[in-house]
Amino acid sequence: MNTPVRFSKVLGLAIAFLFSSSILATEGITVVGKGAVDKAPDQFTVNFVIEKRHSTLSKAKADVDNKKRLLISSLKALNVEEQAITDTQLQIMPVYPRRDNNGRVYLKSNVESGSEVITSASINNGDVSEVYFDVKRTVNVNLNDISLYETLLDKAVKIGVTRISPVQSQIKDTEALYQQALELAVKNAKDKATQMAEQLGVSLGRVIKINEHGYRIPAKAMRGNEMMMSNAGDTSHVGLNSVNAEVTVTFSLQ
């Protein structure tokens, strides 16, 4: 084999090697890294709904307002801060007794014209039937101490609160926890890529690309064994909330 031919083959091998190395360096290996940090929730949200149905709107409203005042007084007595309490506007819904053949109720008001308060309904045959009113107000409370929940629950039931939502647990400041989870996700990605490269007989190179995925830390309703109430201690088990992070990292190979 003459020298030019030999040189040509060597050059071809060198170019092929450089080309394959370039592909490894450019395309590399892409892995997904995940990290999670668990922490017990430190904020708890619960909604108390106060409802009353009555034929007289003013009496229904007075009953709801009185129960709301008693509930808020109980909250303040438990040292719940005022800014942690939010109550919705009064909701009023007329309840009609029956409808005519066309599915409509003809209303006759016994108050001055222009008033939105309807106190009676006139049916086709001319009979007048009483209209009832559903009056409702919701009180939203943020608690920092779950141990207050059982005491508050007992007071709310005695006051006459109609409905109580399941407690939603959450973490106040998640940013610091997320940064910890993000570090764990990056480390997880590097560890995975290193292990894969070793199995392939190559070395891990520089980082070509890294993407951080969006994250969400949902509030969690406390049910089942996370909220166990016993006659002995009425103890709530809040469990743990998990703050998650995820990244996609591409490493070059050499």
Image (cartoon, rainbow, N blue to C red):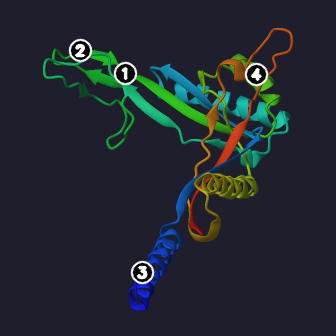
Question: Where is residue 97 shown, x and y percent of the image?
Answer: 32, 16
As drawn, the label of residue 131 is: 1
Q: Which mark is residue 9?
A: 3
Q: Earlier in the sequence, mark 2 or mark 4?
A: 2
Image spot of residue 187 (x, y percent): 71, 56
Extreme bottom residue here?
4
Residue 213 visible in the snapshot: no
- Which residue position holds label 2? 127
One can see residue 112 in this view = yes
Q: Amino acid at mark 1?
A: Val
The Cα–Cα distance between marks 1 and 4, rounded to whole angstroms, is: 32 Å
Left or right of 158 on screen, residue 117: left
Q: Is residue 217 above or below residue 238?
A: below
Label 3 vs label 1: CA separation? 99 Å
Does label 3 or label 1 sit earlier along the sequence?
A: 3
Indicate the secondary structure of the residue bearing disc 3. Answer: helix
Labelled disc at residue 155:
4
- Closer to the chain start, of discs 1 and 4, is 1
Does 13 sit left or right of 253 as displayed? left
Q: Distance between the Cα atoms at labels 4 and 3? A: 90 Å
Of tags 1 and 4, the one toward the viewer is 4
Contact (Cβ within 8 Å) of mark 2 with mark 4: no
